[in-house]
Amino acid sequence: MVYLRTHELVPGMCMARDITFFDSSAGTVVTLKSGAKLTDMNITQMRMSNVVAGAFIDSRNSEARVISSINSEIKENAISNIHSLADNFMDSSKGVSQSDIDAIGNTTEQLIDELSSKKDILINIADIKMYDDYTYHHSLSVAIMAIAIGLEMGYDRKKLGELGVAGLLHDIGKVSVPIEIINKKGRLTDEEYNTVRLHPVYAAEHLRARKLVSDDCCLGIIGHHERWDGTGYPRRLKGDEIHEYARILAVADVYDALTSNRPYRIPNPPNEAIEFIMGGMYTHFDENVVRAFLRKVAPFPVGSKVKLSTGETATIIRNSNDQPLRPLIVTDNGVELDLGDSSKYMNIVILGLCDADAARLIHG
Ligand SMILES: [Fe+2]
């Protein structure tokens, strides 16, 4: 099984796991089941709907295994709960209700259970992504990534719950920003940019006024665009002045945004997005949070094709928590190499993902 980008798909390929996405041209939700053979129409729908990657069976690498970090039913429920909460947020006659928050709280508990029971696995970004409207699947990915970081930082159940809810709701204020501005391809005008910068405030004030979530949760939401060096928004807070939940959400938010397909940007491969986050340590991000993040995220997801320093190409079979850059791989000649075994393979280095340059050309 391999993860492929949509430009690499050809009709007849087999789905290795279920994928659900929103077909915006038809206005319907499409589910392609594990085992289904792709048609021309499926591929067009996936490309039109901004699906970035999917898991497909490749007979040459059938031994590559992916442990799914989150059950797909939980992800679908999460998206539907965020959707209904957002609808009520938008409807000034209603507003967000206690039952909306309870549903989000239950979703968060399920995510914590799933992630706590699989503490030793690395988070694979292609695996947690859902292919629905960007804001909602982004919120879910950020919540999952934030909970994984919180677990790594030793958070107790109460803090994980508040952090998870803040992750699911951090961008809910964006539904108040006109969609033309959110999806605009060119540079935003100052006025448009100022409107976008208010989205953390819209969300936090709405929830705080109704006393629906804790103060800490609100501080996480309102501060997710603050930066460690004080150059963020909306309040230009610095370092410890920024609530720790917000510092965690900032890393999860930027990582997911960088690896997503957006109208104004092509998706970055996970290893390059990780490098960007590392480069922002001390300026944009809290060092402790970045270190926890680095222990939880897979730079080369299982199933991805990579270039080696030997000139060969290989597929990732298994990642390791201790040495994320030294996974178990199988070369295209069928030779299995455990790069974590430094006594044998110290001189072999992974240079990058095979399709990163091709993806740039196609999307660019
Ligand atoms: Fe945001």
Image (spheres, rainbow, N blue to C red):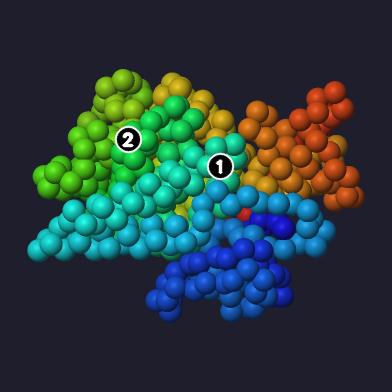
The C terminus sits in image quarter: bottom right
Q: Which residue is mark 1?
A: 118
Kind of residue indicated by mark 2: Lys
Q: Is residue 189 left or right of residue 344?
A: left
Q: Are marks 1 and 2 in contact (CB under 8 Å)?
A: no
The circle drawn on residue 99 is none
In-image side of 105 versus 364 (left or right): left
**Picture quadrant where residue 38 is located:** bottom right
Evaluate whether residue 257 shows in this view: no
Q: What residue lies at 49% left-to-right and 73% top-to-bottom? A: 30
The vertical placement of 174 against 287, above or below, is: below
Distance from Cα at disc 1 to Cα at disc 2: 19 Å
Residue 75: percent from left, percent from top: 45, 57
Which residue is located at x 57 percent, y 66 percent?
18
- The reply, left or right, for residue 295 in relation to residue 323 is left
Q: Would you name the residue on which mark 2 appears?
A: 158
Residue at 78 percent of width and 53 percent of height: 63
Tell me if mark 1 has few (under 14), some (14-19) or many (20+) residues whose alpha carbon lies within 10 angstroms of its own: some
Q: Of label 1 and label 2, which has the lower sequence position?
A: 1
